[in-house]
Image (spheres, grey):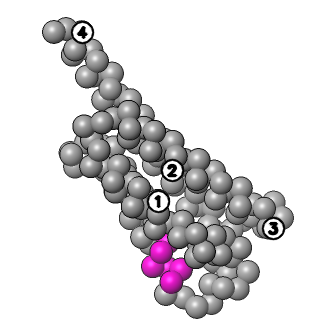
């Protein structure tokens, strides 16, 4: 399970979410709109965004026997990240959103999800090719 590269990508995703959780809950100045994660802060606090995503990805790691379910769960996580990204750009100007450091969270998350999905699809191809040989 852990030797599979998609599990490593998903673990990195969980670690990034844990860093976001710890950094947001340890700093009381985060409630200011001009602070780190600025207007994205209520979305994180009110909807428990990184916590839910971490739990879903953690469950997804243990579904290594069911790759199609893994891909579907990754699609759901990707859609929720798109929703979070739209929420991030909604309350402020485009220039301010592009220069915000919270955008790095979304970029890294999308890259890790893309790499995980691609690795799972490679595994599916390997399994289906070995089934054809039998």
Whether tag 1 and tag 2 are in contact, CB under 8 A, the answer is yes
Whether tag 1 and tag 4 are in contact, CB under 8 A, the answer is no
> Relative to 101, does residue 109 appear above or below in the rendering?
above
How much space separates mark 1 and mark 2, taking CA atoms? 7 Å
Q: What residue span does the magenta drawing correspond to?
A: 20-25
- Number of marks present in the image shown: 4
Query: Considering the image in quadrants, where does the C terminus appear?
Result: top left
- Left or right: 40 as drawn, with respect to 132: right
On the question of residue 115 being in view, the answer is no
At a point 60% along the width and 74% down the height, the residue shown is: 46
- How many C-alpha atoms fall within 10 Å of the one at disc 2: few (<14), some, or many (≥20)? many
On the question of residue 91 being in view, the answer is yes
As rendered, which of 108 and 26 lies closer to the eye?
Answer: 26
How much space separates mark 2 and mark 4, taking CA atoms? 32 Å
Q: Which of marks 3 and 4 is in front?
A: 4
How much space separates mark 1 and mark 4, taking CA atoms? 36 Å
Location of mark 1 (residue): 53
- Pick whichever of labels 1 and 4 is earlier in the sequence: 1
Seen from this angle, which residue lies furthest top?
133
- Pick whichever of labels 3 and 2 is earlier in the sequence: 2
Location of mark 4 (residue): 132
State the SS at label 3: loop
Location of mark 3 (residue): 92
Q: Position of residue 43 (x, y in %)?
A: 63, 70
At a point 32% along the width and 26% down the height, the residue shown is: 124
- Pick whichever of labels 1 and 2 is earlier in the sequence: 1
Does the magenta-highlighted stretch encompass residue 64?
A: no
The label shown at residue 77 is 2
């Amino acid at each position: 399970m852990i030797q599979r590269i998609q599990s490593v990508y998903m673990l990195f995703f969980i670690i990034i979410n844990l860093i976001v959780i710890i950094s947001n809950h340890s700093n009381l100045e985060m409630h200011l709109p001009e602070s780190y994660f600025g207007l994205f802060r209520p979305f994180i606090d009110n909807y428990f965004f990184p916590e839910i995503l971490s739990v879903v990805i953690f469950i997804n790691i243990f579904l290594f026997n069911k790759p199609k379910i893994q891909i579907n769960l990754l699609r759901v996580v990707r859609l929720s990240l798109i929703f979070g990204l739209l929420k991030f750009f909604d309350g402020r100007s485009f220039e301010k959103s592009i220069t915000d450091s919270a955008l790095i969270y979304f970029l890294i998350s999308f890259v890790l999800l893309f790499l995980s999905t691609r690795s799972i699809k490679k595994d599916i191809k390997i399994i289906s090719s070995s089934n054809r040989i039998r």
